[in-house]
Amino acid sequence: MTLASLFLIVLASFFHASWNLLAKRAASVGPVFVFAYNLIACVAYAPWVLYLLAQGRIIWTSAGIGFVLLSGVIHLTYSLCLQRGYQVADLSVVYPIARGTGPMLSSIGAFLILGETPSGTGLLGLALVVAGLLLIATQGRLAAFTRPGGQAGVRWGTATGGLIAGYTVVDAYAVKALGIAPVVLDWFSNLLRFFLLLPLVLTNPRRAIESMRGHWWTAMGVGLLSPLSYILVLAALTGGAPLSLVAPMREMSMMVGALMGMLILREKVGPWRLVGCGVLIASVILLSAS
């Protein structure tokens, strides 16, 4: 993996952890919040897409349109599933389970569907990613998954992880094999989610506006950071980085989230989370050397 690809993935991890912390604050709003930050994303990134359209750099094919539509549907389902998980369970359970199962299933998809060849170093790095995430999330105590809300968190986290794997493989094929620009794929995916969620808001616009009271700045942060974090990952894939390495390396966002909690929220990190961060750093070194 090149140094440029590694830099893009590290930067994406910081943005990803940031928008998830913001999304957790608005978990009670539910699908309306998803609609709001999709609206902001569509408006904010439209100039970039329009520029590419004006330059004639976007060539549509039936396969490309199909993959954009499929990506949008999976991303929408993922967003709703994640937001529901945050409503019924703790972030510390849903987030690591989702981010742990996601790269594992994505890598399997890369091997089976994209024809990537696994290496011993890459497989070891993937295993260390999952181990590091669990250490950070549980602080060495598996009881985190059995306390009230823990089992619900496991269910919703696993479902979210499966959807992460689904859109990751679909989008990787779209940018690597079909040549769709990352920002174009993400923007049209957001636009599709916007129209699919629009009837939900229009049925009772007053209630939707009321539920978003006090959450618009949060939606703006998520709407700007969420697409950017993913566009950077897709750019790394476009640059030739294999999905089986990029998918697990994305999960550095979990380590970044733990460090943000320590530095910004003054949360106690504890020795097990520090060990987990160390394991993730080791996994990144292994994966970048693969």
Image (tube, grey):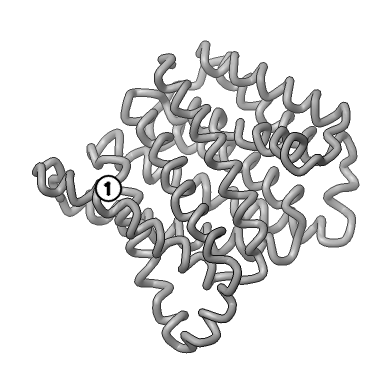
* In this view, 52 is above or below 34: above
* In this view, 128 is above or below 140: above
Three-letter residue code for mark 1: Val
Q: Is residue 103 left or right of residue 72?
A: right
Q: Percent from the top left, x then y, of residue 164?
A: 52, 48
Q: Percent from the top left, x then y, of residue 155?
A: 71, 57
Number of callouts:
1
User: Going by the picture, which residue comes out furthest to the top?
Assistant: 289
Q: Percent from the top left, x then y, of residue 122?
A: 56, 19
Q: Is residue 97 left or right of residue 42?
A: right
Please give the name of the residue rendered at 39% of the width and 40% of the height, measured from the top-left corner: 231
Please give the name of the residue rendered at 37% of the width and 38% of the height, measured from the top-left corner: 172
Q: Is residue 56 left or right of residue 171?
A: left
Q: Name the residue nearer the viewer: 92 or 153.
A: 92
Q: Is residue 182 left or right of residue 215?
A: left
Please give the name of the residue rendered at 55% of the width and 42% of the height, measured from the top-left corner: 16
Q: Identify the image quadrant of residue 80.
A: bottom right
From the image, which quarter does the N terminus lie in? top left
Q: Name the residue nearer the viewer: 210 or 9.
A: 210
SS at badge 1: helix
Label 1 Cα neighbours within 10 Å, binned few <14 / some 14-19 / many ≥20: many
Q: Percent from the top left, x then y, of residue 92?
A: 76, 48
Query: Which residue does the numbered mark 1 point to in the structure image?
Result: 184
Please give the name of the residue rendered at 69% of the width and 37% of the height, measured from the top-left corner: 260
Q: Name the residue nearer the viewer: 132 or 183.
A: 183
Q: Identify the image quadrant of residue 280.
A: top right
